[in-house]
């Protein structure tokens, strides 16, 4: 943290000097933290320059993290420029991540406008990643509005994944509200994925409530996957209650045997 604080303070007055110092640091986490702090300051003054620096780095986690951070700050100062730059990248993983980063930052200020932008993106990874970024950000502000947008999407695997994401994000802040939302959904694929997301998050604090949600899932493969996760979480919190649920639920016998014999 000391390195990161020094880099952040130094770069506010001398980006070039701070960058020269950081580049001489040995490879490792401190150097990565320093570069993140410096490019963050740099992006506030000269996002295009910060972008050019990050684009020159070797492909990998550090470059991805720096680019995403710079773009998200760029959106705050010049949305149109950041979006134009991201859209102009060569088709591929970097372009998809950058458009998603634009949407993530944009949706923290104007989720409705960001949602309209996602709606007009062509089908593909850029759209699916951006929609997921939108949902996670929007759910922290107004999960009901995010749910209303999501339920208008065409049924399919992308909507299913987003229902799961919304369920998890909503349950992080308000597990009761998220569970009530699941209860308003018609039984079917979208409901099952929403219940899965809420139950996965709720299992950490209320495994009994998570189990009730799990039991509303109709898709047997989905049910089995999340039910096993809830069972193991519940065993840590309340052994007797978890064992009773597993004993009466339609788990495969090998799982029931393993669950009964394994100590919490």
Image (cartoon, helix red, strand yellow):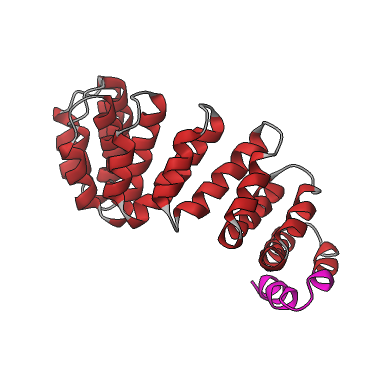
Q: Is 22 left or right of 259, judged from the image as shown? A: right
Q: Nearer the viewer, residue 20 or 133?
A: 133
Q: How many labels does the image show?
A: 0
224 relative to 231, above or below: above
73 relative to 89, above or below: below
Q: Is residue 2 visible?
A: yes
Q: Mainly helix, strand or loop, the magenta region?
A: helix
**Image position, residue 53 (x, y; %):** 79, 55
Quadrant of the rendering where the C terminus is positioned: top left
Q: Is 31 left or right of 223, judged from the image as shown? A: right
**Image position, residue 125 (x, y; %):** 55, 31
Q: Give the range drawn in magenta.
A: 1-18
Q: Is 12 covered by the magenta stretch?
A: yes
**Image position, residue 34 (x, y; %):** 71, 66
Residue at 22% x, 42% y is 210
Residue at 43% x, 41% y is 116
**Image position, residue 19 (x, y; %):** 81, 66
The part of the image, by quadrant, that contains residue 155 is: top left
Q: Nearer the viewer, residue 126 or 18?
A: 126
17 relative to 108, above or below: below
Quadrant of the rendering where the N terminus is positioned: bottom right
Residue at 16% x, 35% y is 245
Q: Which of 91 and 226 is in front in this view?
A: 91
Residue at 24% x, 47% y is 178
Q: Is 10 covered by the magenta stretch?
A: yes
Q: Is 43 left or right of 15, judged from the image as shown? A: left
Q: Can residue 264 be seen in this view?
A: no
The part of the image, by quadrant, that contains residue 100 is: top right
């Amino acid at each position: 943290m000391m390195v990161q604080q020094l880099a952040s303070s130094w770069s506010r007055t001398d980006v070039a000097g701070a960058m020269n110092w950081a580049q001489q640091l040995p490879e490792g986490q401190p150097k990565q933290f320093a570069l993140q702090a410096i490019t963050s300051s740099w992006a506030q003054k000269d996002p295009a320059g910060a972008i050019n620096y990050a684009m020159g780095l070797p492909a990998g986690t550090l470059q991805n993290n720096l680019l995403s951070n710079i773009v998200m700050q760029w959106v705050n100062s010049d949305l149109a420029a950041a979006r134009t730059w991201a859209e102009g990248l060569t088709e591929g993983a970097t372009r998809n991540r950058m458009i998603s980063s634009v949407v993530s930052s944009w949706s923290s200020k104007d989720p409705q406008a960001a949602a309209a932008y996602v709606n007009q993106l062509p089908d593909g990874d850029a759209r699916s990643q951006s929609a997921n970024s939108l949902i996670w950000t929007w759910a922290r502000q107004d999960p009901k509005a995010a749910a209303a947008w999501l339920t208008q999407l065409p049924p399919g695997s992308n909507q299913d994944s987003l229902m799961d994401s919304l369920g998890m994000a909503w349950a992080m802040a308000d597990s009761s509200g998220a569970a009530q939302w699941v209860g308003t959904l018609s039984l079917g694929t979208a409901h099952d994925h929403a219940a899965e997301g809420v139950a996965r998050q709720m299992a950490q604090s209320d495994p009994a409530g998570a189990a009730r949600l799990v039991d509303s899932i109709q898709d047997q493969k989905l049910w089995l996957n999340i039910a096993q996760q809830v069972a193991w979480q519940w065993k840590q919190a309340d052994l007797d209650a978890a064992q009773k649920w597993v004993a009466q639920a339609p788990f495969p016998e090998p799982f029931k045997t393993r669950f009964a014999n394994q100590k919490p």
